Amino acid sequence: MTDIETFTTEARAWLDANAELRSRNDSGQRELVWGEGEFSVSVFHNLSFEEEKAIIDDARAWTQKKAEVGYHKITWEPEFGGMGLTKEHEKAFFKLESEYDTPGGHETHSVTTHLMASSIRILGTEQQKEDWVKEWASAREMCCQLFSEPAAGSDLASVATKADKDGDEWILNGQKVWSSGAQFSEWGMAVCRTDSDLPKHKGITVFVIPMDAPGVEIRQIRQMSGGTSFNEVFLTDVRVPDAHRIGDIGEGWKVALTVLGFERESSNGSSRVGGNWAQAKGLAQYLELTKDPIMRDELARLYTQYRIMILNGQRIAAQTKAGQPPGPEGSISKMIWVKSMNLMSDVVSKMLGARMTADTGEWGTYEWNEHLLGAPGYRIAGGSDEIQRNIVGERVLGLPGEPRVDKSIPYKDVLK
Ligand SMILES: Cc1cc2nc3c(=O)[nH]c(=O)nc-3n(C[C@H](O)[C@H](O)[C@H](O)COP(=O)(O)OP(=O)(O)OC[C@H]3O[C@@H](n4cnc5c(N)ncnc54)[C@H](O)[C@@H]3O)c2cc1C
């Protein structure tokens, strides 16, 4: 196996040939020069379809470039396009990569390359692995998550979208909602009800559907921060081959939990959305608030929270072994990340006051409005704060479960 030193030298040469170094200060940190360049702290994009697609295309192009060598999935086996190396190699690459100007992330891109590709790699049939894992991991094709429904969010096991078997095919009917990036995706992973006579967790099956199949209708939803990241997806007599079923019939709950586990694991603050400590500190310096005793206290609180997030990320990375499905500890990471982001909104709002609500053209000020309006969304996405606490309470701390009166009765008899 390539040793870390050789690997790092080769990776540095590859990055030099394919990307530009960011400007850095004397201590090697990425430099923020107040007033210079683009300033973004948005959590969700407030963009037109074409503008948002351009961001996704940039992210895809960079992942595809990395995939030519295997830098996109360093710990994965070569059969899935990876390099078969260790977490330490991956960590070394991420550290190097962060020194270069590379395209920003996008939720649909990370859903596809992390959640969906990783889940099929573990749970797919040989054919499904061959068809989708490399394609999705390298972002050549995109896949969205068709899980939530108007009456099944936190209680995902209550999904009502029906899948009825018809020979070698299934016919899907129902409505999904909050489907991020459905408008940019070639594929969607849909959680469906295949048996209403069984209790709700048992009669569920998961399918991968082509988003351009007849009967799939995507309607965009406008969000309060602007932009339309989410969609309603209506499925009317959509035919899906049985070969697109993920896992056994009635075993869809396990599939959904695997995907959600990856989602919680990846919601650990490593994404670049929602601003960073340097931007908040830069604002405090610009507004000359760093000597204000109350603001110093707030900033210390924020800095501490961000350090906790980073240390927790390091702990999880050290524990995760390549290829192992994620556990309930991902819920802790998600809560820390969301808390950090919302605390940042809070502290920055105190610093900015009215500047948060009126665009005066002053660099690095009104832009925080997009942060304030976007950050609460992640208290809900991928399982709300309350649900994460339930998971930690029951599955990490071993506390008694909350009463679930509909757990053992047939889905068709559950009061809706
Ligand atoms: C930014 C964003 C992106 C999303 N992307 C996707 C996507 O791509 N695909 C997808 O399928 N879905 C997506 N969702 C949907 C998301 O998974 C759901 O919104 C979430 O699971 C909550 O479900 P709900 O909205 O139906 O709220 P509800 O489940 O109705 O919850 C309402 C409130 O009740 C609380 N609550 C519910 N049950 C309990 C309980 N047992 N104990 C304590 N409190 C409880 C909740 O915490 C919440 O405060 C996204 C949501 C957001 C905000």
Image (cartoon, rainbow, N blue to C red):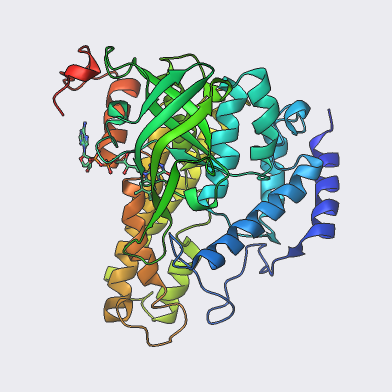
Left or right, 187 with respect to 79, comes to left
Depth check: 21 or 217 in front? Answer: 217
Measured as percent of width and height from the top left, residue 100 is found at 71, 60
Measured as percent of width and height from the top left, residue 355 is found at 32, 81
Depth check: 146 or 60 in front? Answer: 146
Can residue 88 be seen in this snapshot? yes
Q: Residue at x 58, y 77 (%)?
A: 33
Which image quadrant for residue 141?
top right
Where the C terminus falls, by quadrant?
A: top left
Q: Above or below — where is 198 with respect to 38? A: above
- Ligand 1: give its quadrant: top left
Can residue 327 be seen in this snapshot? no
Q: Above or below — where is 168 with respect to 145? A: above
Q: Above or below — where is 40 with respect to 314? A: below
Depth check: 294 or 105 in front? Answer: 105
Q: Residue at x 79, y 37 (%)?
A: 4
Where the N terminus falls, by quadrant?
A: top right
Q: Residue at x 74, y 26 (%)?
A: 77
Total count of labels = 0
Left or right, 233 with respect to 71, comes to left
Q: Residue at x 28, y 12 (%)?
A: 198
Measured as percent of width and height from the top left, residue 156 is found at 31, 31
Measured as percent of width and height from the top left, residue 375 is found at 35, 57
